[in-house]
Amino acid sequence: EAGIAEYRKRLGPYARVELLSLPDEPIPEGASPAQEEQVKVREGERLLRHLDDGTYVVALDLRGKNLSSEEFAAFLAERELRGQSNLTFVIGGSLGLSPAVLRRADFSLSLGRMTFPHQMVPLILLEQIYRAYKINRGERYHK
């Protein structure tokens, strides 16, 4: 949480950042694949209710496009050039995102093939967004 707060502060001069965290749907102990799919569907329905019509949705998904930090910076710069400055990054629950959320997404992004604790993903994403702004502005990145 301290890291998230730090990167939100660092991003202040570049962008308005809002974080919305929805509680995970409970997963029954020993859930079948069909039950897990139903959990994802319910989570997806809740997520979709929070997406504005005009927002450009980036879904974080293991099967998404894997970008280097420089490529991600170029991706964000391209969104700005196209007037798509209202971006929403969607992070799924422990089971991933529902098919409906993935269909709604304008872009699917992978943070790599490694598995991260769910609580770390917002921190990693915010750090990469901050790094992208620094890259795009030719500013030195202070670690």
Image (spheres, grey):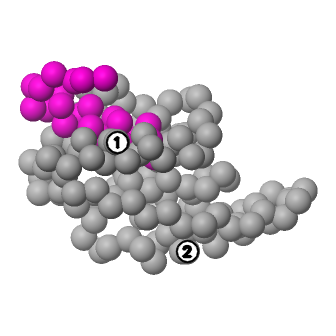
Residue farthest to the front?
2
* Amino acid type, label 2: Glu
Of marks 1 and 2, which one's residue comes earlier in the chain? 1
Q: Which mark is residue 45?
A: 2
Q: Position of residue 136 (x, y in %)?
A: 14, 32
Q: How many marks?
A: 2
Residue ID at (50%, 63%): 21
Residue at the limit of the structure toward the bottom, as seen here: 49
Q: Secondary structure at mark 1?
A: helix
Give yes or no for contact between labels 1 and 2 (Cβ–Cβ under 8 Å): no
Dot 2 lies on which element?
helix
Which image quarter holds the C terminus?
top left
Residue 2, percent from left and from top:
44, 43
In the rendered image, residue 95, in percent from the top left (x then y), is placed at 67, 53
Q: Amino acid at mark 1?
A: Glu
Residue 83 visible: yes
Q: Which residue is mark 1?
A: 6
Q: Residue at x 39, y 60 (%)?
A: 19
Q: Answer with the quarter of the image where residue 31 lies.
A: bottom right
Disc 1 versus disc 2: distance between alpha carbons? 31 Å
- Looking at the rendering, which quadrant does residue 33 occupy? bottom right
Q: Main secondary structure of the magenta part?
A: helix
Question: Viewed as shown, does residue 104 lie left or right of 129?
Answer: right
Q: Position of residue 103 (x, y in %)?
A: 46, 61
Front one among 17 and 52: 17
Point out the stretch of residues depicted in magenta.
122-143
Q: Is residue 37 magenta?
A: no
Please indicate, yes or no, whether residue 64 appears anywhere in the rendered image.
no
